[in-house]
Amino acid sequence: MAPVTLFSRDLSTVDNVEPMAAPINVFAEVPKVKLQRTGQRPLVFEGVEVCSATTHSPGPSLWYEINLYRKQAGSLVIDIRFFGKPNDMKDRFRTFFADSLDEVAHILEAYDPALDINADIPVHDDSVPVSVIALQAAVVRMRLDEARRQFADLIGEILHQLDVQ
């Protein structure tokens, strides 16, 4: 099991204020956040990081990072990042929006890490032996299982830290 590290920041501002009713005014200067998104333009907004967690540790071939931000307007931004070490695994950056911590929990619980795993198996190439295809399929299955396990560990830690029930 990969260790999960969680850094909490300013959790009291998330649920004590109606997310869309009151903007963040407690900061003299609200920083700009710029999030990379796969296949889309970067997302730029003013806000603060509420928490961040990662499953990265020496050794695993893939890992996740989840960051939660509160926009100045009060809504929440979920930043899910997938990283893979092998050259055939592409890093993925996805963002989701929520108005409450309950909605954050639903989005995280509904996310399928299988979307992040490439399954490029040459099934239409007659020159590739069936044994090679079977071996590649087993590797993909192992990656899927590892991604799902790590992501489940990560969201469990985040939802526990945020006290979402």
Image (spheres, rainbow, N blue to C red):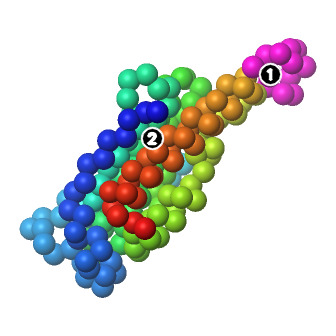
Quadrant of the rendered image containing residue 4: top left
Residue matched to label 2: 64
Between the C-alphas of marks 1 and 2, the distance is 27 Å
Residue at x 80%, y 22% (from the top left corner): 134
Q: Secondary structure at mark 2?
A: strand
Residue 90 drawn at (x, y percent) = 54, 34
Q: Residues within 10 Å of mark 1 (few under 14, many from 20)?
A: some
- Residue 36 or 18: which is nearer the viewer? 18
* 115, above or below 136, in the image: below
- 56 to the left or right of 140: left
Residue occupying the point 51% across, 62% down: 107
- State which region is magenta: 122-135
| Dot placed on the residue nearer the N-terminal end, 1 or 2 | 2
Apparent side of residue 67 relative to residue 135 in the rendered image (left or right): left
Q: Amino acid at mark 2?
A: Tyr
Q: Tell me if residue 68 can be seen.
A: no
Q: Nearer the viewer, residue 74 or 3?
A: 3
Residue 133: mark? 1
Q: Is residue 154 magenta?
A: no
Looking at this view, is 74 or 60 the one in front? 60
Q: Position of residue 95 (x, y in %)?
A: 46, 56
Q: Residue at x 30, y 55 (%)?
A: 51
Of all residues, the one furthest to the right in this rendering is 126
Name the secondary structure under disc 1: helix
Q: Is residue 143 above or below residue 101?
A: above
On the picture, is 35 further left or further right than 32?
right
Q: Quadrant of the C terminus?
A: bottom left
